[in-house]
Amino acid sequence: MTLAEPAAGSTAQGSPPPASRPKRNKIKTGEGRLAFFLVTPTIALLGLIVGYPIVKAIYNAFLSDNQKINPDTGLLEQAGAWTGLTNFKHWLLEQCPSGTGTTIKCPPGNIGSQFWDSVSVTVGFTVVTVALETVIGMIFALMMNRAFRGRALVRAAILIPWAIPTAVTAKLWQVVFDPQGVLNKLLGTHFAWTSEKWPARSAIVIADVWKTTPFIALLILAGLQGISADIYESAKVDGANAWQRFWRITLPLVKPALAVAVIFRTLDVLRMYDLPAILTGGANGTTTLSILVVKQLHSGVYSASALSTITFIFIFAIALGMVRLFNANIVGTPGKGGK
């Protein structure tokens, strides 16, 4: 009589299968130590270049721009004294010094009264431009993904605006919207497009959509090219029409690329500066948060640091919310396949 052979995945001594044995910590191996030492300089450099300015700006946000007399000592304090949350109240609550040691509501025209208007302008630009760029970018991507004669030429023509620097784009559209510019020549009018609030805002939206729609189209195109044609053939066999194929196949499968495109563009528009600064100078209701920060730099560095800190927190909160909304975990979660 012979003994039965051990079952697959086990040993005669009863030891656990190899898959259940704890893995060695690779950081203790020579390869892990080498990787750690190679990555450490990069992390230290990023901490120096990125981390230090952020920490310094946050610290400066609590300092005073103005000279004042300390009521306890009667001495004149230089700018840079610790002032607590005064700078944040100046922006969030629109409080300005009254000259008697108290604060009052910032009068109209004062830069301190422009914060919430700038927030609404920035959010408005973001919602409108990203929505238009997403829809138009999807259409362009679907066009570029089709096989037809001259497709390379069409792709190049669509992507050209993205290659043009933003400052050049702003000057180009400034010529278009000039009272003696191209648009008025075509329409036979003499309207000053950037001299009133809503026409000026519309001009910025048009210029930004023209400039950055190819970026979203390019990212969506990359997602479309990863979809197998067999899926569409199977859907056609099952009787799905073009709209059903787009809604049930294309849109779900292109969602990761679309989410990245929308998040990137949202963050980009939230910090928009050069396009409205060149096209309108921030006048006529086109002052964004970034333009407001630059304006404040001319009168007070520490107050501008507070505004920059508020803007950073504002954009970070929106970015975090969008990542959760799209369920787009960029980093990836261990044990879940990065989904």
Image (tube, rainbow, N blue to C red):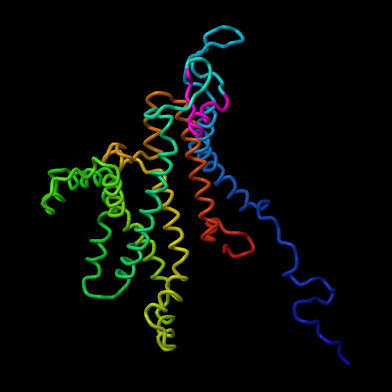
Q: Position of residue 161 (x, y in %)?
A: 26, 54
Q: Nearer the viewer, residue 45 or 195?
A: 195
Q: Farthest residue in the top direction?
A: 74
Q: Position of residue 40 (x, y in %)?
A: 57, 43
Up-down: is 253 above or below 240? above
Side (left or right) of 227 relative to 174: right
Up-down: is 164 above or below 19? above
Quadrant housing residue 272: top left
Side (left or right) of 261 relative to 43: left
Query: Magenta stretch containing residue 96, yes or no?
Result: yes
Q: Residue at x 42, y 89 (%)?
A: 237
Q: Nearer the viewer, residue 60 or 290?
A: 290
Q: Position of residue 119 (x, y in %)?
A: 43, 41
Q: Which residues are magenta?
A: 84-98
Q: Residue at x 53, y 58 (%)?
A: 325
Up-down: is 69 above or below 179? above
Side (left or right) of 101 relative to 11: left
Q: Residue at x 54, y 18 (%)?
A: 81
Quadrant housing residue 289: top left
Q: Farthest residue in the right direction?
A: 1
**Quadrant showing the C terminus:** bottom right
Q: Position of residue 59 (x, y in %)?
A: 54, 28
Q: Residue at x 47, y 27 (%)?
A: 105
**Quadrant showing the N terminus:** bottom right
Q: Nearer the viewer, residue 115 or 63?
A: 115
